[in-house]
Amino acid sequence: EGETAKADYQRRAREGTFKARVLDLSRTAIQQHGPLHTTQLVDLIEKAGVVITAQDKMTAVSVILSRSPEFVSDRTRGWSLATQEEKTPRDVAASEGSS
């Protein structure tokens, strides 16, 4: 059922639309950097050339992400991917040192 919801949401976020760009850029940023707060995502989205016309930019991005089953919000850590294995910097350092 989760995959169906994700596919439905992505289908409605047609390629090239504002919603699709926010989802794509957020996904890529979180994959590269780990969990990010909404303020960080807004900055990255705008630096990528996407114009956020909403009066409250953080709310606009947050609403899009919260409606997607692909993203999970944590007030302390920020947004992460629901399928992403959570690793802290300490976990990464430990795994790199254990080869």
Image (cartoon, rainbow, N blue to C red):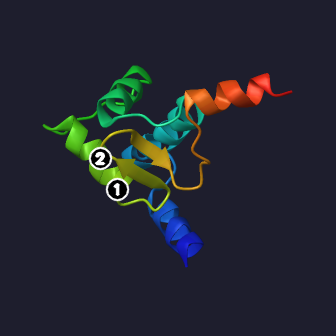
Query: Where 22 sits versus 45, above or below?
Result: below
Label 2 Cα neighbours within 10 Å, binned few <14 / some 14-19 / many ≥20: some
Q: In the rendered image, which quarter is residue 56 located in?
A: top left
Secondary structure under tag 2 reads helix
Q: Quadrant of the N terminus?
A: bottom right
Q: CA distance from mark 1 to mark 2?
A: 6 Å
Question: Label 2 is placed on what type of residue?
Answer: Ser
Q: Is residue 28 left or right of residue 97?
A: left
Residue lying farthest to the right in this orientation: 99
At 33% from the left edge and 31% from the top edge, which residue is drawn?
42
Query: Which residue lies under the disc numbered 2?
Result: 62
Q: Quadrant of the C terminus?
A: top right
Location of residue 16 in the rendering, given as x and y in whole percent from the top left corner: 48, 44
Query: Where 10 sits versus 60, above or below?
Result: below
Residue lying farthest to the bottom in this orientation: 1
At 45% from the left edge and 41% from the top edge, which residue is drawn?
21
The tag on residue 97 is none
Q: Does the residue at mark 1 contact the one at mark 2 (Cβ under 8 Å)?
A: yes
Question: Label 1 is placed on what type of residue?
Answer: Ser
Q: In the rendered image, which quarter is residue 18 located in?
A: top left
Between 34 and 52, the one nearer to me in the picture: 34
Query: Where 10 sits versus 97, above or below?
Result: below
At 62% from the left edge and 48% from the top edge, which residue is drawn?
85
The tag on residue 66 is 1
Location of residue 54 in the rendering, given as x and y in whole percent from the top left corner: 18, 39
Q: Is residue 37 left or right of residue 69?
A: left
Secondary structure under tag 1 reads helix
Between 52 and 32, the one nearer to me in the picture: 32
Location of residue 61 in the rendering, given as x and y in whole percent from the top left corner: 30, 43
At 46% from the left edge and 64% from the top edge, which residue is drawn?
9
Label 1 Cα neighbours within 10 Å, binned few <14 / some 14-19 / many ≥20: few
Location of residue 53 in the rendering, given as x and y in whole percent from the top left corner: 22, 36
